[in-house]
Image: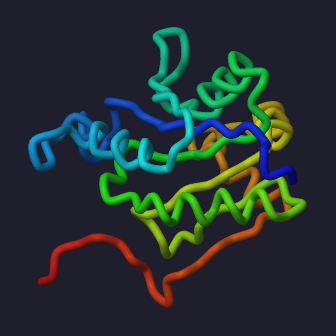
Amino acid sequence: MNANVPILAIIQARDGGTRLPGKIRADIGGASMLAQVVHRVSLVGLPFVVAYPPPEYKENDVLSRFARVARTNPHVDAFVRITADCPLLDPSVVGFVINRFRQGNTDFVGTSPEMDGLDCEVFSRSALLTCDLAAHGRAREHATHWMRRNLAPTIINWAPEPLRWRSRR
């Protein structure tokens, strides 16, 4: 993969959700959760978009939003998936995953599930558009599950155990 490949970060956002609706608007240190994520993504130095579901799309069809971003940005060859509910996202993790994607001959590089809260994924345009055609049902809500199962993904795991942010009991 060429180091100069155009990459666009997509911050996946929605107001709904069953566990905590509107969580991306929650105040964290004087700014919304989404604003915190936008700030951290801006530190990576990539152009980015926030992908809200437009009225004509189902909120749970995240994959359609990603494909729409790809189709409206034909000059972009790869995409970074970031979720709007990860306010502690580490820009250095994102940068590492991007650099690993640029080094290899792979269509998908992502963090392991153990890195939940610090997770990000980078995938090629062709992987995204193929996934949009092939994925059905719940795989459309979890936009990259199909890619993880059907491509030869490179998975990065810096966590010997889950790194979930949670309170001590």
Q: Is residue 160 left or right of residue 27?
A: right
Q: Residue furthest top?
A: 56
Residue at the location (82% across, 31% down)? Answer: 133
Spot occupied by residue 43 in the image (x, y as percentages of width and height)? 42, 48
Q: Is residue 149 left or right of residue 43?
A: right
Residue at the location (63% across, 62% down)? Answer: 97
**Please, which colouring scheme is shown?**
rainbow
Q: Quadrant of residue 65?
A: top right
Q: Is residue 98 left or right of residue 162?
A: right
Spot occupied by residue 140 in the image (x, y as percentages of width and height)? 64, 38
In this rendering, the answer to whether 4 lies above or below 73 is: below
Spot occupied by residue 116 in the image (x, y as percentages of width and height)? 44, 66
Spot occupied by residue 132 in the image (x, y as percentages of width and height)? 76, 33
Number of marks = 0
In this rendering, the answer to whether 163 lies above or below 52 is: below
Residue at the location (45% across, 58% down)? Answer: 91
Residue at the location (68% across, 40% down)? Answer: 7
Q: Residue furthest bottom?
A: 160
Taking depth in this image into account, of 9 and 52 the one nearest to the observer is 9
Q: Quadrant of residue 22?
A: top left
- Quadrant where the image shows the C terminus: bottom left
